[in-house]
Image (cartoon, rainbow, N blue to C red):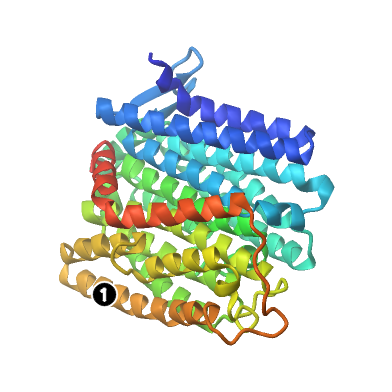
Amino acid sequence: MELVQNFPFLTIVFSLTCGVFCAVLKARTAKRLCLCWLTLTTVMSLAVLVYTMRTNGYYVYRMGKWNAPWGNEIRVGILEALMASVFSGVMLLSLLGGMHHIFADCEPEKANLYFTMCSLLMSSLFALIYTNDLFTAYVFVEINTIASCALVMLKSSARTLVATTRYLIMSLLGSGLFLLGIVTLYGITGELLMESIAEKVREIFASGAYSLPLTVIIGLFSVGLAVKSALFPFHSWLPDAHGNATASSSAILSGLVLKGYIIVLIKIFYRVFGLDVIVAKQVSQFLFLFGVCAMIFGSVGAIRERDLKRMLAYSSVAQVGYIYVGIGLHSRLGMVAACVQIIAHAITKPMLFIAAGGFIDVSGGHKSMSALTGAGRRDPLGGVAFTVGALSMIGIPFFAGFVTKLHLTQGALESGAATMTVALAAIAVSTLLNALYYVPVIFNIFSGRESGEYKGLRVRWRADYAFSLVCFIALNIGFGSFSRIVVGVIRRGLELFGM
């Protein structure tokens, strides 16, 4: 075994270990340790991506001397390595961009715990990406839930406590449904390893036995993970949680956490049940319809908001809808579009939240649109970053969001007439709605009619904030301009999923 093949396991275990050390270190030392480790995990994940691209395959890493099901194992392929690289890099940039707010919003004695939670969250995301075992997935889903709620709660205010409580209740509901699905599936198949379950499911489906239980199990997985990823109409907890958290937390929750659950759902659909079973049970049609509703009603919610961060949170509901529409097309092109959207949103929405944090700094701590008039002139780099992110969300060419809409449109054109019509109409309407709430914000932040109270204020130069936004801008434009390379990697990764 080559050294690089150990890296996925090491990123999971050492991220957990980093969290333990951060809990007992002083805040500044914990910050340095966390940032150094995230930099290293990004490099390690990129090395794994290069290795899997070179070998053009996947490998199974066994933990311990026993084979599954007695031992545990992870599966590493091109798509997994790509997602791990993106997630680790975005986590690093999100922390850097909002570092000032972390120390300003958290109580001094709790600041080190913020980096503990980030390390645990990163460990859970790596595990969800790589795991080959359903029960291990459930364990890290719960770790992800606890760490995510803690990231919201560590900003000391009454609103964040209320938002965290709602977040926790909905997350536990989703986790409970997910666990019920695992238990019921284990009762039918007697397996927890994904490949072993897939073999049993094929036999059961071919024989016609357990038809209703299989439908219920797929429904439990789908609804449970839809709740946790804020798919419409299970999104009510998201605006409060993301809108009231500190800037880095909002960036991480929207850009990464929601996507981790969706990746688990994709793995369950295509590596546990298989496309034939999913289509036969008509689950993909429901996800498609809910995704379309999310695209529309998420944007409508954003239009009605006058709080910038809550507007961005509602926008995330709409953007999650794009992913589910891609999954619901139950085709190769649709899944390519879904994976493209996972990456495009991961490198765009954190940039918007970080830039919004800069606007709030130069507007007396206010988040209302009226208070943010001229904020882009007071914080020029934040203004440029927000504009790039907004144009990407609208779907302007040469930005990341355009790549999603292009591939989603291609996937819709290859589907049935009814599905194609609904999908194309939803993309067009959603694009128009995106423009209706992002374009006015762009004009507002660059408006010359600044409030006298904040006129003349300028953002205090911070290298970490500037570095984060510059990197996000480069990633977004680079992805939008050279998407063929990333899409090619996604296609090769999906081939290893049997698609």
* Residue at (76% x, 46% y) in the render: 111
Number of marks in picture: 1
Q: Position of residue 359 (x, y in %)?
A: 61, 69
- Side of 119 where 63 appears, left or right: left
**Amino acid at circle 1:** Val
- Side of 287 where 316 appears, left or right: right
Vertical order, 162 against 138 (above or below) = below
The residue carrying mark 1 is 422
* Residue at (41% x, 42% y) in the render: 83
Q: Position of residue 328 (x, y in %)?
A: 31, 60
Q: Who is closer to the viewer here, 495 or 444?
A: 444
Indicate the secondary structure of the residue bearing disc 1.
helix
Q: Who is closer to the viewer here, 397 or 76?
A: 397
* Residue at (59% x, 74% y) in the render: 375
Q: Position of residue 318 (x, y in %)?
A: 44, 69
Q: Quadrant of residue 113?
A: top right
Q: Residue furthest right?
A: 109
Quadrant where the image shows the C terminus: top left
* Residue at (68% x, 73% y) in the render: 457
Q: Residue furthest front?
A: 456
Residue 366 visible in rendering: yes
Residue 290 visible in rendering: no
Vertical order, 243 against 463 (above or below) = below
Q: Position of residue 120 (x, y in %)?
A: 63, 39
